[in-house]
Amino acid sequence: MKNTPFTHLHEKFGAKMVEFAGFNMPVSYTGINEEHITVRTGVGVFDVSHMGEIWIKGPKAFDLVQKITTNDVSKLSPGIAQYSCFPNGKGGIVDDLIVYHYGNQKYLLVVNASNTEKDWNWIVEQNKTIGAEIENASDNIAQLAIQGPKAINVLQKLTNIDLASIKFYTFTVGKMADVDNVIISATGYTGAGGFEVYMYNKDAVKIWNAVFEAGKEFGIKPIGLGARDTLRLEMGYCLYGNDIDDTTSPIEAGLGWITKFVDGNDFIDRKYMEKLKTDGIKKQLVGFEMKQTAIPRHHYEIVNKNNEKIGHVTSGTMSPMLKKGIGMGYVDVNYKQAGTEIFVKIRDKNIPAEVVKLPFFKG
């Protein structure tokens, strides 16, 4: 297993450590519910150094990124970030990612930890006919996500950058905790507000210590991957490997908003995606709430009132904020409308649920 620059600090804080995407990562410290509520109401810190970072540079950088991602990169200017996905040439998704327009002819792609090698190989293959400069910098960069409504109070102590000016899906590069060339972005995966801070490994512990010292008065705590999952699910955000994968299209996953059919955006699978949008899809990713006390889990069957299988659960949990079971799953399109009654098969019992609009938690 790989360690991050913060692994020894997680162990010092008493984290329960698990293997995740080849890394030794903290799943929880004091308990998922407590950590979840800390982020929703205060401020918590996630080590997300396991995420992958890939640079695309040079005169052909735009051409490559526009080809391999579904969103419209031409809309980006330096300092703007964009949620997108890599189509796989077969109608599915290689990975979802965030594209940072770092500067002239320079983009940073932040990808999922479990897919970094797969994504890199995919980019290398697609770049053979384009010739952009590409660099896998994943092993050199550490990342902390400081999340929650009090995150800005903590981090503003450590930088002269006006953090309030960093709007959702924008970023800047500057000094934090006397460390230069730090990327500070606001692309949060929790829906609780806050920032992501990218740094070189050599500066990681210095920044961690400064963040926790600045956050003492706000009750700052380290947060594990368990609460990261429950927080993202309350917002209805997709998790690769659960809600999206190589067999699901962005149209089916409700990601039509990052699939841009505009002039000049001839991304991989464009014709297939357009046909899906025109002809209609057979399954749709939806959110649902349980009507009885029960927790839906990955792979559970979803059925209709006649006990006919209509889909399956992709993600599920007991919402710490809503105190009810919530989940996402693919269902036959006839059952996609909010308010529709469905049933989740749990231990051979059909437990009633209702399709709802996302996000589950509205703050």
Image: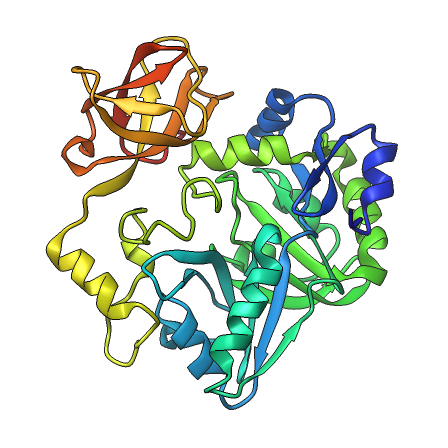
Q: Which one is nearer the viewer's eye here, 188 or 271?
A: 271
**Depth check: 153 or 87 in front?**
87
- The spot of residue 334 in percent (x, y) is 14, 34
For this orientation, the residue located farthest to the left is 279
How many marks the image carries: the answer is: 0
The residue positioned farthest toward the bottom in the image shown: 59
Quadrant of the image occupied by residue 33: top right
Expressed as whole percent of the image width and height from the top left, the position of residue 8 reads 87, 41
317 lies above or below 258: above
Residue at image position (43%, 43%) is 238
Quarter of the figure with the C terminus? top left
Residue 169 visible, this orientation: no
- Residue 296 in the figure: left or right of residue 26: left
Q: Quadrant of residue 335?
A: top left
- List x then y, in percent, for residue 288: 32, 26
Residue in the picture at 51% in, 76% down:
125
Residue displayed at 65% across by 68% down: 173
Tell me if 253 is positioned left or right of 218 in this view.
Answer: left
Is residue 278 depicted above or below 349 in this figure? below
Is any part of residue 122 visible from this angle? Answer: yes
